[in-house]
Image (cartoon, rainbow, N blue to C red):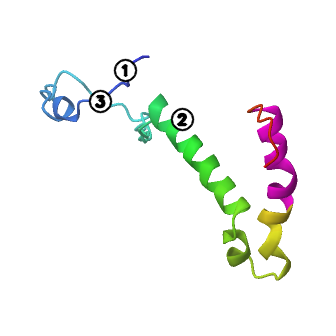
Amino acid sequence: MLAPVTLDTTTLETLPAPAADSVAPRADTTPAPAVEVRPRWNLATRVAFRLSFIYFTLYVLTTQMLGGLLPFNWAGGLGFAALNRSLIPWVGTHVFHIGYQY
């Protein structure tokens, strides 16, 4: 992985100024707009954030938290009815090869 490019601002501030008579300012030159450099997350941080986001999203959807977050009466049993009765036993049987009835 390549190291991020850093800009040394102290070097830019301490460069010697050019002589006044050697460089004449041009009238048609406009200063370039400043580009904001945003820091990037490294790979481990991105993977950890994505896994945590998925984990907590599934946790809220499959527990009673969803009923507390939504102001509807029918949202209280969404997690238990939908996932606990069909999806979770299917994953246990087909993905984890659990052979006994649970």
Tell me the CA gap for discs 1 and 3.
Answer: 13 Å
- The quarter holding residue 83 reads bottom right
Q: Give the range drawn in magenta.
A: 82-95
Q: How far apart are marks 1 and 2 (CA)?
A: 18 Å
Residue drawn at x 13%, y 25% is 19
Instruction: Judge whether 20 appears above or below 52 on screen.
Output: above
Magenta stretch containing residue 85, yes or no? yes
Residue 24: percent from left, percent from top: 26, 27
Q: In this view, does 82 lie above or below 50?
A: below
- Which mark is nearer the camera, 1 or 3? 1
| Residue type pointed to by label 3 | Leu
| Element marked by disc 3 | loop
Picture quadrant where residue 65 is located: bottom right
Q: Which of marks 1 and 2 is in front?
A: 2
Q: In which quarter of the image is the N terminus?
A: top left
Dot 1 or dot 2: first in sequence order is: 1
Marks 2/3: CA–CA distance: 27 Å
What residue do we see at 68% from left, 75% from top?
69
Q: Marks 3 and 2: in contact by CB < 8 Å?
A: no
Q: Name the residue under label 2.
A: 47
Question: Within the image, what quadrant is residue 31 found in?
Answer: top left
Report helix, strand or loop for mark 1: loop
> According to the image, label 1 marks what residue?
3
Q: Dot 3: within a 10 Å radius of its alpha carbon, few (fewer than 14), some, or many (20 or more) residues?
A: few
Indicate which disc, 2 or 3, sits on the residue closer to the N terminus: 3
Magenta residues: mostly which secondary structure?
A: helix
- Residue picked out by circle 3: 7
